[in-house]
Amino acid sequence: MARIESSFPDFGYLDSLASRDSPIHRLDPRVKLLTTLLFIVCVVSFDRYALSPLLPFAIYPVVLLTLAKLPPGYLLRKLLLASPFALCIGIFNPLFDRAILLHVGSLEISGGWISLASIMLRFVLTVAAALILVASSGFDSLCLALARLGAPAAFVVQLLLLHRYLFVLGDEALRLARARAQRSFGRHGIELPVVASLLAQLLLRTLDRAQRIYLAMKCRGFDGELRLLRPLRIGATDLCFLIGWTAALLCLRFVGPAPMIGRAIGGMSW
Amino acid sequence: MVTRPVVEVSDLRHAYADGTSALRGVSFQVGDGERLAIVGANGAGKSTTLLHLAGCLLPQAGSVRIAGLPLCRDTLAPLRRCVGLLFQNPDDQLFMPRVFDDVAFGPLNLGLPADEVRTRVMHALAVVGATHLAQRQPHRLSGGEKRAVTIAAVLSMSPTILLLDEPTAALDPRSRRQLIELLQTLGQTIIVATHDLDLVLDLCPRTLVLGEGSVIADGASGIILRDEALLAAAHLEKPLRLQSCPVCRGVSGQAASGCHSSNRV
C-alpha cells in the first residue's frame, strides 16, 4: 500500500508544471490541443511495420520539451509507468507474425518484432506528446479548450470533475489504506477479500459524495451547461505555431524527410 | 421578536427512503435579518431541516415558505436564488478547477453579464478576505481557506438567507474565530446547524433545539444555553464559556487569583 502513498503526489506535480511560464505555456490551449491531435493522428496512421518514417516525428516532443523547460526525467518516468499497457498490446505479435522481413547480418528479424517495435515507438511518441500537452497547459485549460472547440458539455463536465475529485478520492483511498495497514501488522501481499471491501467502501463513499456535489451544483443554479469565464485569444504567435507545425507534420507524414534531405544535399553538390 | 418572517416552516415531516423518520412535525419562523441556531444531537434532524430550506428536499408533509413563496417543484429556481447553502464539507462544494471559477459558477448560471460576474466574484472574495486565492486550485487550499471560499461562492449570488451546516467543523481555532467574525459582519438572515455552542453564543441571539425530529425548545440563546436539563435532554453540554473553570472550581472566594496562578505554573 506504500505504493499509493509514494505515487500519488505525482498528479499534483503535473499540475504544478502547468503553472510555470514558458513560450509554450503562453500559447492558447486550443492551438496546442489541435497540434497534438494532428501529431497523434499522423504517428498512428503509418502502416504497421513502419519504423524509420516514425523516427523524425521525435522532433515534435523534443522541441516542445525544450521550449517548455519541462523536466525530461519526470516525463520518462511517466512513460515507463504506462509502458506495460502498450507492451501488452504488442507482446504477442512476435509469436503470431513469424515472417522474416529483415536480415541484419546473420540475424533474421520477423515482422512481429518489427511491428512490436513500431507499437512501442508510437506509444512513446504519442504519450510523450500528450504528457507535454497537459504539463504545459494544465488540465482545466484543456477542458476549456475542448469546450470552446465544440466538445459536448457533458463530456467536458465529466473531465473537469474527474480531475478535481481525483485528489479527494486519492486522499480517501490513502486513508483507507492507512487504516488497513494500521491493523494488518506488517502482513504484505494482496488479500482479496480485504481489497474488495476497501474498494466497495471507496465506491460507496464516492457515490455519497457525488450526490452531495450534485446538490451543491443544483443549489447554485447548475443546468447542465458549464460556464467558464476565461478569456482565450488566438494571437499571431499561436497561428504561427499551428500553421508551422501543421506544415511540418504533414510534410513528415506524406513526403518524408529522406527525399527532402537528399534533394537538399543533391542540390548543393550540383 | 419575529418581524417579517422570511422563513416559515410549519409541521414539516420527512422520512428517508429506508423508513427512518427524520422530521416529525417541525414548525418555526425566522424573521428578516435574524440569526438562528439549530442545535441538537446527531440525527436530530438539523441537516434535514437545512436541506429542506435550501430546496434540496421537498416537504413530504407540512409546508416550507421562503420569502412568501411556498416550496414546491415549480418554485425551486427562484427559491434557490435567495437561499445560499454551505455544506459541512467544503470539498463537496468547491467543484470547479480554480477558486475564481467556483465563485463565478453561481452568477454565471444566473445568466449575468461577464463584467457583472467579475465584479461580484472579486467583491465576494474581498468580503471573505480571499482575493489572493482567486487563481489557486481548491485542492491546494487549507481548511480555513476552503471555508472562506465556499462562503464567497455563496455570497456571489447575493442570497438573502444563508444556511450553514456545521461551519466550524474541522477548523483550527484561529480560522474558526475569523469565520465567526466574518459571519457577524454579514447582514443576511443566517440559519446555522451546529454542535459548536460557543459559536451560537457569539453569533445567534436565538436558538432552536431539535430532538428526534421535533422542536424541544425555541427561544433566546442566553436562556436556552444555560438550561442544563434541557441541553442534557438534547445530548448537548453548556457552552464551554458558561461552564465554571475546571482549575478553580471548588476554590471558593479566591476563584480568580487561584485560576490565574495555576495557569502560570
Image (spheres, coloured by chain):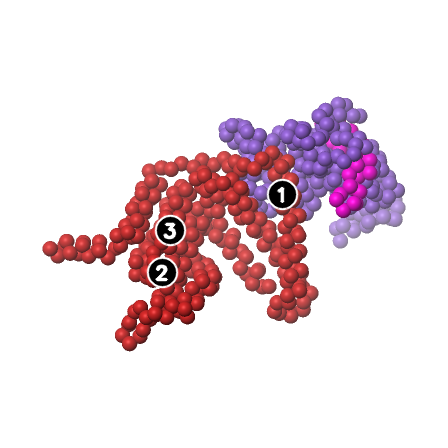
Chain colours: A red, B purple
Give the residue at x 64% y 36%. A219
Question: Which tag, 1 or 3, sits closer to the chain's start?
Answer: 3
* Viewer-side label of 1, 3: 3
Is A255 left, or right, of A68 in this rendering? Answer: left
Extreme residue in the bottom direction: A106
Magenta span: B12-36
Q: Position of residue B10 (x, y in %)?
A: 80, 30
Whether residue B23 is situated above or below residue A105 in the rendered picture: above
Dividing the picture into quadrants, the one containing residue B12 is top right
On the same chain, marks 2 and 3? The answer is yes
Q: Position of residue B254 (x, y in %)?
A: 85, 45
Q: Which residue is mark 1?
A: A213
Q: Position of residue B143 (x, y in %)?
A: 63, 46
Q: Which residue is mark 3?
A: A41
Q: Separation of disc 1 and disc 3 at Cα?
A: 37 Å
Q: Separation of disc 1 and disc 2 at Cα?
A: 46 Å
Is A54 left, or right, of A175 in this rendering? Answer: left
Q: Position of residue A199 (x, y in %)?
A: 63, 58
* Viewer-side label of 1, 2: 2
Q: Which residue is mark 2?
A: A48
Q: Separation of disc 2 and disc 3 at Cα?
A: 14 Å
Dividing the picture into quadrants, the one containing residue A93 is bottom left
**Residue toward you, B109 or B126:** B109
Amino acid residing under circle 2: Arg
Residue A11 seen in the current view:
yes
